[in-house]
Image (cartoon, rainbow, N blue to C red):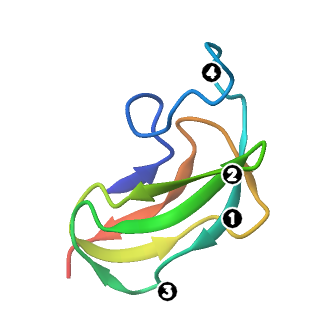
């Protein structure tokens, strides 16, 4: 399953009414290859000093595709969740 930066619902609108163009990957809260549960917080992203934690969309093994400092847009691939 693809794990993307949510385009609605999961990432708040930090700009007071306008959708955020890009966010910076701050850190993964789990290691690549870690087994996670659905809705477990797994990655933090930052925009204008606001940090938001994104949960896993499903249970499984996380495969990271972005790294600290990467800029991502809503809908971009963060990683995948594989069946254990």
Front residue of this view, candidates 68 and 12? 12
**Residue at mark 3 to residue at mark 2: CA–CA distance:** 19 Å
Apparent side of residue 15 relative to residue 8 in the rendered image (left or right): right
Q: Secondary structure at mark 1?
A: strand
**Residue at mark 1 to residue at mark 3: CA–CA distance:** 14 Å
**Residue at mark 3 to residue at mark 4: CA–CA distance:** 29 Å
Residue tagged by mark 2? 46
In percent of width and height, residue 77 lies at: 54, 51
Q: Residues within 10 Å of mark 1 (few under 14, many from 20)?
A: some
Q: Quadrant of residue 26?
A: bottom right
- Label 2 vs 1, first from the N-terminus: 1
Tag in front: 3 or 2:
2
Q: Residue at x 45, y 39 (%)?
A: 6
Q: Residues within 10 Å of mark 3 (few under 14, many from 20)?
A: few
- Label 3 vs 4, first from the N-terminus: 4
Q: Are marks 1 and 3 in contact (CB under 8 Å)?
A: no
Seen in the picture, residue 6 relative to 2 is either above or below; the reply is above
**Residue 19 image label:** 4
Q: Secondary structure at mark 2?
A: strand
Quarter in which the N terminus is drawn: bottom left
Q: Are marks 2 and 1 in contact (CB under 8 Å)?
A: yes
In percent of width and height, residue 69 lies at: 79, 63
Apparent side of residue 30 relative to residue 74 in the rendered image (left or right): left
Residue tagged by mark 3? 31
**Residue at mark 2 to residue at mark 1: CA–CA distance:** 6 Å
Q: Are marks 4 and 2 in contact (CB under 8 Å)?
A: no
Q: Secondary structure at mark 4?
A: loop
Seen in the picture, residue 19 relative to 42 is either above or below; the reply is above
- Label 3 vs 2, first from the N-terminus: 3
**Residue 26 image label:** 1
Quarter in which the C terminus is drawn: bottom left
């Amino acid at each position: 399953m693809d794990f993307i930066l949510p385009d609605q619902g999961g990432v708040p609108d930090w700009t007071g009414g306008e959708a955020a163009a890009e966010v910076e990957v701050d850190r993964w809260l789990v290691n690549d290859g870690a087994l996670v549960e659905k809705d477990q917080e797994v990655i933090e992203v930052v925009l204008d000093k606001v940090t938001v934690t994104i949960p896993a969309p499903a249970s499984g093994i996380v495969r990271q595709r972005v790294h600290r400092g990467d800029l991502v847009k809503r809908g971009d691939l963060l990683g995948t969740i594989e069946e254990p």
